[in-house]
């Protein structure tokens, strides 16, 4: 029975790994580099998640669980403990400025929309916004970059209007990192939580999906457009909801010790003819 369960799980992961391998090969990353990363993840999770009475798992137990040698576990734990594998997810000054422009009471109008801001001023100005939330970035440099990314318009009188809260990363690598860290990882982490037999009772993290095998090809373009429009509306509504709760921080900078809260939305259409699975 256990072997059947393991085969089912491995078959599913072989499917999940197809797009991951596509990305890796696109960036010239082969099996050996990926295998080292996978081994580090096995050792990291085995050490931190399967301890007894809250203590880290010892090297021998991690070796038994993962199938790696104790020497390999010790080497990988040393690498992880040194911080060489730590992934730092930072909020960029641009993201922080746009987010605060949409959420801080000082910079929104009576209808809850971002105000049109004068460039200078001690309060309710673009310069004051950047000084509060842009770190050491000069207001002029921030204005130039936001205009370059077409996130703001500058009027003839020098006032600035924010156009969109959606920030597209400047290159595909940044876009990939954003999608993996803020999209793929939260989805898989939610899946791991919701399928844990030892999970706490009660309402778990929300996770919904709908699918169909009966959509005709000629209808998919229209369906994709409708899905995009509706998902965009939902994304904006959640962004507003998050901004409402963020406003309770009363202008404080984000605390990296706080757990991340995320909601993800996507439209999927299978375009890989070699993905072997049945719904």
Image (cartoon, rainbow, N blue to C red):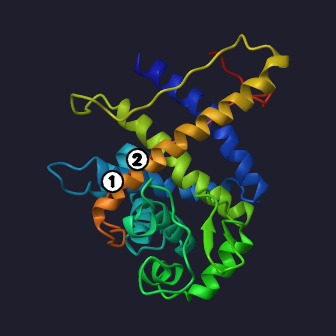
Q: Is residue 73 above or below residue 218?
A: below
* Vertical position of residue 27 compared to residue 218: above or below: below
Q: Pointer 2 and pointer 1: residues touching (CB < 8 Å)?
A: yes
Q: Give 13 or 88, whichever is nearer the viewer.
A: 88
Q: Quadrant of the N terminus?
A: top left
Q: Residue 92 or 143: which is nearer the viewer? A: 143
Q: Position of residue 3 (x, y in %)?
A: 46, 22
Which element type, helix, strand or loop, lies under badge 2? Answer: helix
Disc number placed over residue 241 in the picture, else none: 2
Give the crowd class for mark 2: few <14, some 14-19, many >=20 residues within 10 Å: few
Looking at the image, which is closer to me, 108 or 189?
A: 108
For the point 55% across and 30% down, which residue is it? Answer: 10
Residue at the farthest left position = 53
Can residue 74 be seen here? yes
Residue at image point 37% right, 44% down: 65
Q: Which mark is residue 29?
A: none
Residue 149 image offset from top left, x and y in percent = 71, 69
Q: Disc 2 to disc 1, how far (Cα)?
A: 7 Å
Examine the rendering and report whether any part of residue 269 can be seen: no
Q: Within 10 Å of the Cα at label 1, are there few (<14), some (14-19), or many (20+) other Cα atoms?
A: few
Label 1 SS: helix
Q: Position of residue 105 (x, y in %)?
A: 38, 64
Quarter occupied by residue 191: top left
User: In the figure, is residue 189 to the left or right of 26?
Assistant: left
Q: Residue at x 48, y 49 (%)?
A: 239
Quarter of the image with the C terminus in it: top right
- Farthest top residue? 214
- Name the side, left or right, on which 203 lies relative to 72: left
Query: Against 223, is 259 above or below?
Result: below
Residue 160 image point, x, y percent? 62, 73
Vertical placement of 98 versus 3: above or below?
below
Which residue is tagged 1?
245
């Amino acid at each position: 029975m256990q072997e059947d369960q393991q085969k089912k799980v491995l078959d599913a992961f072989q499917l999940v790994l197809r797009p991951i391998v596509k990305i890796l090969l696109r960036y010239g990353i082969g099996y050996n580099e990926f295998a080292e990363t996978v081994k580090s993840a096995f050792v990291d999770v085995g050490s931190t998640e399967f301890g007894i009475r809250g203590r880290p798992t010892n090297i021998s137990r991690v070796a038994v669980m993962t199938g790696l040698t104790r020497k390999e576990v010790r080497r990988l734990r040393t690498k992880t403990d040194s911080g060489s594998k730590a992934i730092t997810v930072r909020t960029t000054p641009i993201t922080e400025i746009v987010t605060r422009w949409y959420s801080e009471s000082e910079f929104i109008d009576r209808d809850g929309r971002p105000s049109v801001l004068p460039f200078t001023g001690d309060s309710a100005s673009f310069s004051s916004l950047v000084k509060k939330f842009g770190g050491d970035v000069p207001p002029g440099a921030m204005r130039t970059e936001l205009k370059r990314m077409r996130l703001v318009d500058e009027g003839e009188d020098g006032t600035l209007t924010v156009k969109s809260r959606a920030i597209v990363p400047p290159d595909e690598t940044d876009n990939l990192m954003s999608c993996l860290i803020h999209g793929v990882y939260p989805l898989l982490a939610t899946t791991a939580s919701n399928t844990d037999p030892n999970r706490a009772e009660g309402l778990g993290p929300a996770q919904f999906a709908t699918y169909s095998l009966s959509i005709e090809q000629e209808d998919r373009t229209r369906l994709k457009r409708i899905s995009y429009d509706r998902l965009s509306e939902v994304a904006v509504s959640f962004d507003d909801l998050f901004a409402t709760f963020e406003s309770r921080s009363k202008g404080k900078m984000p605390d990296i010790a706080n757990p991340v809260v995320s909601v993800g939305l996507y439209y999927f259409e299978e375009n890989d003819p070699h993905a072997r699975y049945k719904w």
